Image (cartoon, rainbow, N blue to C red):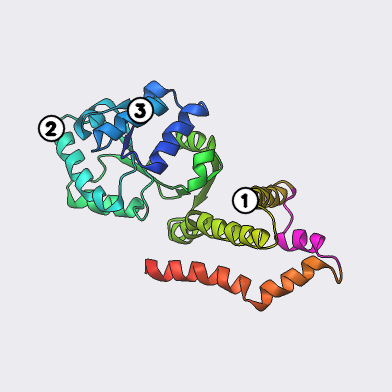
Amino acid sequence: MDQFGFIGMGNMAKALAAGFIKNGALKADRICAYAPNQEKLKRNADEIGFIPAASLAELAQKCDTLIMACKPYQIEGVLQELCDLRAQGKSSCTVLLSVASGWDHAAYVNTLSKLHAEGSVRIQFVMPNTPAMVSEGVFLFEETTSLHEEELKQVKEMFARLGTVEILPSHLMGIGSAVSGCGPAFVDLLMEAYADAAVKYGIPRETSYRLIAQMVLGSAKLQQETGLHPGILKDQVCSPGGTTIRGVGALEENGFRHACISSIDAIMSAKK
């Protein structure tokens, strides 16, 4: 695994490429990328430092490891083109890492089988989330993989530079991505709501955002570093007859926990 090529250069791919370079996981000259919008690709290349490719064929020829970061609906067409290039002896790719939602190991194997190319590449599905943009991401690695042991170790170490790596069985990748992938939006909604409350009672908007964001960050870090159950940490803030327990009571009356669980239920129902 010497040269890494991104297929697509959207927000997540940009975050990963920039993070790998910034955190020393990969040198800039080991990262290439291809995207149809060449003008935008070159701007991103100038900003981040990777090498732009003029075509998928050029990328496949230069890179032994490709990172599928395009839209999920585009993947089948990309795989067809990659298989054609391989048949013509114009592809160096032996490993395929996928960060595209919904495309797990089985989906790739099934599609490649239809293209008569099963076993042509070794595959690892990784589900990232947006906090990867600030090197605080969660990266769910599907347990089912065809990567060699040393390859898997290298890839895990790369992604660990940008956050936390967790390995999940294939049947839990859906719920895992619902929580860690969609969860940031729910936390953002929570922060926005509490910032609105702060503004309602007189705190300036920008100050409110800083205050709430740091509160969420600090609370998460406190749980991580202590390992204490969130209920225990909550109890430590709730004095008998105090203000916090009154707020907790109001949240319970309005179905806060039920709303959180229902948000995941809605996602999982949509996946069926």
Q: Is residue 237 left or right of residue 111?
A: right
Residue 209 versus residue 245 in the image, above or below: above
Membership of 256 in magenta stretch = no
Q: Main secondary structure of the magenta part?
A: helix
Say which element carries label 2.
loop
Above or below: residue 137 compared with residue 21: below
| Residue at which label 2 appears | 88
**Which label sits in the foreground, 3 or 2?**
3
Q: Position of residue 42 (x, y in %)?
A: 30, 28
Check disc 1: other Cα within 10 Å, few if <14, some if 14-19, many if 20+: some
Q: Residues within 10 Å of mark 2 (few under 14, many from 20)?
A: few
Pointer 1 residue:
209
Residue at image coords 52%, 37%: 162
Q: Tell me, yes or no, whether the two marked residues, 3 and 1, touch with CB atoms within 8 Å.
A: no
Amino acid type assigned to the residue bearing label 1 in the image:
Tyr
- Identify the amino acid type marked 2: Gln
Compare residues 271 and 259 and report the one nearer the observer. 259
Could you tell me which quadrant the C terminus lies in? bottom left
Q: Residue at x 73, y 69 (%)?
A: 247
Looking at the picture, does residue 121 appear above or below residue 46?
below
Q: For residue 197, what is the image quadrant? A: bottom right
Residue 227 in view here: yes
Q: In the rendered view, does 14 fall on the left or right side of 82?
A: right
- Considering every residue shown, the one lying at the far left of the view is 88
Q: Which residues are magenta?
A: 226-239
Residue visible at 17% across and 47% down in the picture: 116
Instruction: Measure the alpha-carbon separation of dots 3 and 1.
Output: 32 Å
CA separation, marks 1 and 2? Answer: 55 Å
Mark 3, other Cα within 10 Å: few <14 / some 14–19 / many ≥20:
many
Q: Is residue 174 left or right of residue 85?
A: right
